[in-house]
Image (tube, rainbow, N blue to C red):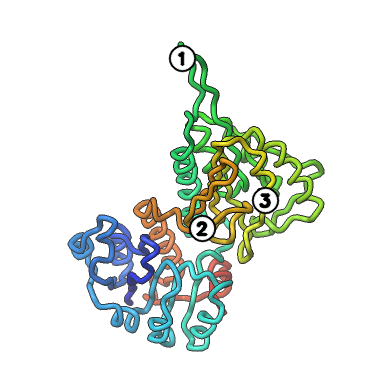
Amino acid sequence: MIIGSILENKKDKRIAITPEIVKKYISLGFEISLVKNYGSHLGFSDNEFHDVGVKFKDEKEIVKNSNIITQLGVLSDEKLSMMSEKQVLIGVLNPYDNKDKLQTLVKKKVDIFSLELLPRITRAQSMDILSSQANLAGYKAVIESFANFEKAIPMMMTAAGTIPAAKVLVVGAGVAGLQAVATAKRMGAIVFGTDVRMASKEQVESLGGKFLTVEGSENLETEGGYAKEASEDFKKKQEELLTETLKKIDIVICTALIPGKKAPLIIKDYMISNMQPGSVIYDLASVQGGNTAFTEADKTVEKDGVKIMGESNILNKLPVSASNLYAKNVFNFIENLYDKEQKKLNINLEDEIISKTLIR
């Protein structure tokens, strides 16, 4: 069986197959087909791939002849038109925005697996691309915001006087938010966290952060462990708490997202007006509209002396680490899909991991 991958999305530096993972696929009996210069932009040379058994082919041959195609996102319409029955496409395919494209493939009897739909169960943790990528995103958001903050982060006591520690607020305490809390704390900041899910309180506090609790909080968590939309009453109370808190905060890391929906608007324009000049907001939700009133993807907007930074793909700043983790996630998913005795794929719909990620 052949596993193939091509480079198509020039806006994303990440790759789905690394030399380390090629060895694992070959040990299972797969053949790997890649385009030339597949990983050269990340320091993975063609020789490195060749030495572990990769066969180089052109894009069309890979798309037409691979049993499994693994990517970061959806292929172009031209490439999708080349796919045929019984082929398998695996990636982060964003089924909410790409519904029509994916349904066209379903009609052609192509099996499509979108990995962001993985269930939050213990057995799926090694395949959880949202967690592995969000972990890196939370870390890098802190590094980027600190680099743009024009004061020291930890408290410093000097003969000339004391520099107070920076105060950081993390909005949304999922995987990215918790990593942001941990990273900011390690770097000496005073850290606060807030989330609509009450389970997050213990997690934030275990990392040394202080959890901001909305009075009369309800637990807004889905069965899958994601945040769901808050009631109007909750939103009002959250606004009041944030308005007062933001007056004292130096750096805000926004990570709040609802799968398949526009990012919730949490930090309103008047809240930003009340923040201290020189403060920084880093909005990881910018690609889905942002958590602030002024967020723009891939731009730094300055409002009343506050910098609001939005990045559509922060992982482009950590592409090697992100690719290594993503490639391992995909390998673990394919290994679960593969029957080693029969030497073929087994799309067992009784397996929750398979049934939840399969687009039908």
**Amino acid type, callout 3:** Ile
Q: Position of residue 174 (x, y in %)?
A: 59, 49
**Amino acid type, callout 1:** Thr
Query: What numbered label is drawn on residue 167?
Result: none
Tell me how far mark 2 sits from mark 3, CA to CA: 16 Å
Tell me how far mark 1 sits from mark 2, CA to CA: 39 Å
Name the residue furthest top: 159
Tell me how far mark 3 sits from mark 1, CA to CA: 38 Å
In the picture, measured across the screen, residue 260 lies left or right of residue 42, that is: right
Q: Position of residue 126 (x, y in %)?
A: 47, 56
Query: Depth check: 265 or 15 in front?
Result: 265
In the picture, measured across the screen, residue 228 lies left or right of residue 283, that is: right
Q: Quadrant of residue 277?
A: top right
**Amino acid type, callout 2:** Ala
Image height check: is 246 above or below 358? above
Quadrant of the image containing the C terminus? bottom right
**Label 1: how many Cα within 10 Å (few below 14, some 14–19, many 20+):** few
Q: Earlier in the sequence, mark 3 or mark 1?
A: 1
Q: Position of residue 336 (x, y in %)?
A: 46, 66
In the picture, measured across the screen, residue 10 lies left or right of residue 224, that is: left
**SS assignment at label 2:** loop
Residue marked by disc 3: 266
Q: Earlier in the sequence, mark 1 or mark 2?
A: 1
In the picture, measured across the screen, residue 264 lies left or right of residue 344, that is: right
Residue drawn at (17%, 62%) of the image:
47
**SS assignment at label 3:** loop
Q: Earlier in the sequence, mark 2 or mark 3?
A: 3
